[in-house]
Amino acid sequence: MSWWARARGRLREPLEVRAGVKRRRTARRNGGDPAVDHPGPPPTGFSLLPWLLMGMGSFSNLLQDETSNPWIGGLGLLAFNSLYIYVTFRSFDRDRRRAPSTRVALLLMVLLTTALGLGYGGSWLMFFPLLGLATGATLRGPWLGRAGLLLTLYAGAVSALRGGWSDATSIAYATFLSSMVTAAILGLSEAVRELRAAREELATQAVEKERLRFSRDLHDLLGHTLSVIVVKSEAARRLAPRDMDAALTQIGDIESVGRQALTEIREAVTGYREGSLGTELARARSALSAASVTPVVRRSGAPLTPATEALLGWVVREAVTNVVRHSDATSCEITIEGAAERVRLTVADNGTGTGTGTGGTLTRPAEGVGGTGLTGLTERLAAAGGSLTAGPSPRGGFSVTAELPVEPARAAAVGAATAPRES
């Protein structure tokens, strides 16, 4: 970037400051919080330029011809102001203020300030507070205290040699105050902006997490419910010619499933839906029976925590949906075995892995944990300290096995998290 482009950027910054002020006023009129709605542009070197007025006394001495060797004094004043502007503008960028060129420019300011103070004294000693201001803006961090103290003692010593102890006290105090206060204000401003950026990032992540929860929950609920409705509709169509009462029973089940789906969707929208293993087992029996699959449910062991039941309920829902949609099974066994430390859920069928449950041939994963629903379940169970395995069973068919600690450390958090995606 050329010097002209940088200069145009610097000239544009005050316009951005004014625009930020205008936005904050608008937010205040609209009843919003201007600090939250728009924090404004970050501070720049322009905020430190007015302090150059502290050097007006030496400039006045030059104009009134009260300085010996005015050309040297004028060049020294110009050099100091140039170095001050260079250092302060670079101090508002973390990488640039830590660059060696910035530290070299600050060291040149120390040498130049010492030369002007010893050479002319009086108002020229006021460059030491300006030097402290530039030091505080540049050296933020653990080295600031040592550097500020050393600079204060150094400024006092130079002032004592040139103007006596009265000047030394005031100059040393002003140097210490300017360096520490500047560093504190700029450091606090930078910390506030970083915290505000972190808060905005956390808010964005919370929104993304809620969107993901809603989309996964809604997707899984609709996928399972529509599969059950399709299966029961096909059963009603087959039964209608020969057994109208049985067909009407299936139609009643379809109505019940639809109403339950509406309730679950409302709960998913509000985020209060919690899975129940007992409810999912009852629905699994109904869905499997409608698909002409004989359900066999075995349950043993101590009662489980609500969070553990919620996770296992999602496994039952996903596994049974896959049996109904993707297999030609005639039977499905759901086994829940609770031990002292872990609980195991197994959903196994005797199908071939393909089926026409939705009107066409469907193929499900041949091995491993396939499909987005099983992948999502694997991640959720792993977060709770459990595991999920799925694949062809040695006895034929397909098997899904989930294991969880009886009281998983993160079960409460995971149980309220998002639902798995449907495969």
Image (cartoon, rainbow, N blue to C red):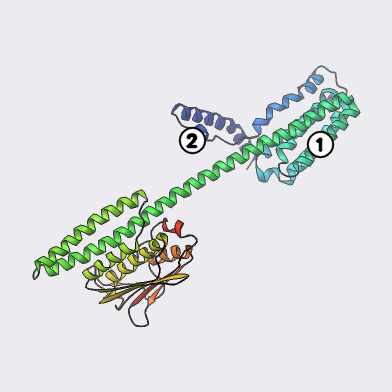
Residue 305 coordinates in the image, percent (x, y): 42, 62
Of residues 178 and 111, which is closer to you in this image? 178
**Does residue 174 appear to the left or right of 270 in the view shown?**
right
Q: What numbered label is drawn on residue 37?
A: 2
Residue occupied by mark 1: 151
State the image quarter where residue 249 is shown.
Answer: bottom left
Judging depth in this view, the residue of 339 and 234 nearest the camera is 339
Callout 2: few (<14), some (14-19), or many (20+) C-alpha neighbours within 10 Å? Answer: few
Image coordinates of residue 269 in percent, x first then y, are: 34, 50
Residue 354 at least partly seen: yes
Q: Is residue 379 above or below residue 67?
A: below
Q: Which residue is drawn at 50% across and 61% down?
A: 409
Nearer-the-camera pick, 198 or 418: 418
The image position of residue 180, as x and y in percent, is: 73, 35
Q: Which residue is pictured at 62% across the width and 43% down the height?
A: 1
* Residue name at image x 30 percent, y 53 percent: 265
